[in-house]
Amino acid sequence: MTDNPAASDDFPSSSLNSRIVTTRPVAARIWNYWLGGRDYYEVDRKAGDEISRMHPSIHDYARADRQFLGRAVRHLAADVGIRQFLDIGAGLPTADNTHEVAQRVAPDARVVYVDNDPLVLVHARALLTSSPEGRTDHVDEDVRNVDSVLEHTARTLDLSRPVALMLLDVMAFVGEDEDPYGIVRRLMDALPAGSHLVLSHTITGPGWADVDAAAAWWNVHGTPRLKQRTPEAVTRFFDGLDLLEPGVVSCTRWRPESTGDDTGEPEEVAMYCGVGAKRR
């Protein structure tokens, strides 16, 4: 983890650069490509274009997930009063990162980003900007290593006060044999009442054959492997929490600011999300 407000002069280290995989497409880099970023390699662009060919709406999913993040963070900061955010699987920096959204509402907000992708860490300086009143830090860790994540997070966040745990499409890369529900439960158990879980997840189900085909292609060619889940399985991540309205829904349909047309409801995407409150 680096210290705020700026990383050390020798960051990133050569060891981080040596960890960057350039022979296979990587999820964080493809996501950056779909969102219009510049932090990807040719192997990622080619894979992103192939997935787009198989499933042309994937760009809409990426945007919908990012827009959900913004709406959820604004709600928690402005309406709930959350001042601490733990964003695990943060990905590469792009427009409206968690700390930018939160600190527009509350300049004293504190944000810890967690990611195990070395290219994300290479770009950590972009994430480690903060308002003078707040703080932003970054942890080089995997969501599966719950104890280490919490230990490092506690250097920046006060875990006796409410925290928004952000898990934006990261649990889709945790297999059933790795206890995904237990990981989320352990993270939330470490946080006090008033904390919230913000989670999104790629889904599968009837009518999503092109999504399933793209996911299958990715699991052969990309890294890390993707685990799709049904909307019902995604809802299980919120067990023991009070789901905020409208529940677990398409990212486009979680408190949309506008529908974009006259039908009254945005188009559904195969990226579902929800926000749950820990009441006790």
Image (cartoon, helix red, strand yellow):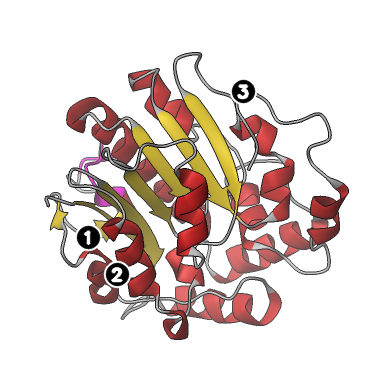
Residue 275 location in percent, x, y? 24, 51
The total number of labels drawn is: 3
Tag on residue 248?
Answer: 1
Relative side of 114 to 261, left or right: right
Question: Mark 2 sits on what residue?
Answer: 234
> Which of the numbered marks, if any, corresponds to residue 101?
none
> Quadrant of the image for the N terminus?
top right
Residue flagged by tag 1: what amino acid is it? Answer: Val
Tell me the CA gap for discs 2 and 1: 8 Å
Q: Which mark sits nearer the N-terminus, 3 or 1?
A: 3
Label 3 CA crowd tier, 10 Å (few <14, some 14–19, many 20+): some
- Crowd tier of the residue under label 1, counting other residues whose Cα lies within 10 Å: few below 14, some 14–19, many 20 or above: many
In terms of sequence position, does the residue under pointer 2 or pointer 3 come before the other?
Answer: 3
Which segment did they paint magenta? 252-262
Answer whether labels 2 and 1 touch (C-beta < 8 Å).
yes
Q: Quadrant of residue 125?
A: top right
